[in-house]
Image (spheres, rainbow, N blue to C red):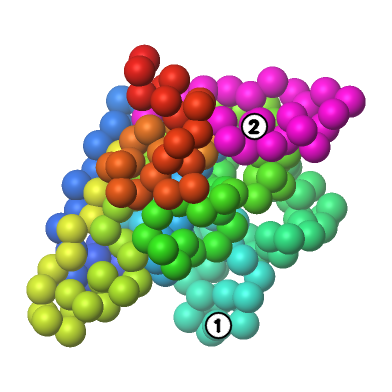
Amino acid sequence: MRNFIRQLFRLLVNAIARVDANGYENLPKEGSFVIATNHLGILDAPIAFYALDYWDMFVLIGEKWEKVALFRWLGKYFNFIFIDRHNPDIKTLRKVISLMEKDNILVIAPEGTRSRTGSLIEAKPGVSYLASKLNRPIVPVAITGTEDKALFGNLKKLRRAHFTLTAGPAFTLPPLPRENRDEVMKQYTDEIMCHIASLLPESYRGFYAEHPRLKELLQQ
């Protein structure tokens, strides 16, 4: 059933969009890792299963989508974990950590919600806490073209959209210190987002466009 759902999803995406995926060489060859992406539209969550032939991925999804029957159904096959992005509970965090210890791959969107502007918005620090807690490589992935407004606008005109997925080099975050944790979490969050921003066209960089860390990454 899973393979059928994946093939059906790929057929659907190919019917409505041309997808260019780049940076496969940046994915770790073994062990678990974290994929961190920007978030533009409703297709962002399952798009990893279009681009990658892994079934050991799981995706953190905002708890509001659990109320939507389609997302609950897809979640059974695309390994969605519904989470309160503002107040993640200990049970859910333990489940995520347990899955990572079994060499699964975590897909997260640090912004926590879809950007209504089409460019990066300020990310939530909870994701950086989780990423540092897991002590796994983080692969930044930049997505363009999946904005809901653009996607549905193209559908109305019977025109295919153009999605791009670009993976950058993996990096790691040190464990959180006991002191100044809030400040360090903010730094870690900015680090993740600036790595994503460095892979995006300038018009998509939004909140992080003038961040000093982004400028450093672009010069490297």
Q: Which residue is mark 1?
A: 68
Q: Which mark is residue 22?
A: none
Q: Which residue extends farthest top?
A: 220
Q: Quadrant of the C terminus?
A: top left
Q: Which residue is mark 2?
A: 188
The residue range painted magenta reads 168-191
172 drawn magenta: yes
Up the image or down, 68 lies above or below 99; here it is: below
Q: Quadrant of the N terminus?
A: bottom left
Q: Residue at x 20, y 53 (%)?
A: 19
Q: Residue at x 31, y 25 (%)?
A: 25
User: Mark 2: which secondary structure?
Assistant: helix
Q: Nearer the viewer, residue 8 or 48?
A: 48
Q: Residue at x 71, y 47 (%)?
A: 126
Residue 69 seen from this side? yes
> Marks 2/1: CA distance?
32 Å
Q: Residue at x 46, y 25 (%)?
A: 170
Up the image or down, 98 lies above or below 6; here it is: above
Q: Nearer the viewer, residue 41 or 80?
A: 41
Q: Nearer the viewer, residue 204 or 46?
A: 204
Which three-letter amino acid code belongs to the residue tagged 2? Answer: Tyr
Give the image quarter of residue 161. bottom left
Neighbours of disc 2 within 10 Å: few (<14), some (14-19), many (20+): many
Q: Position of residue 159 (x, y in %)?
A: 10, 73
Q: Position of residue 190 (x, y in %)?
A: 58, 36
Mark 2 or mark 1, whichever is nearer to me: 2
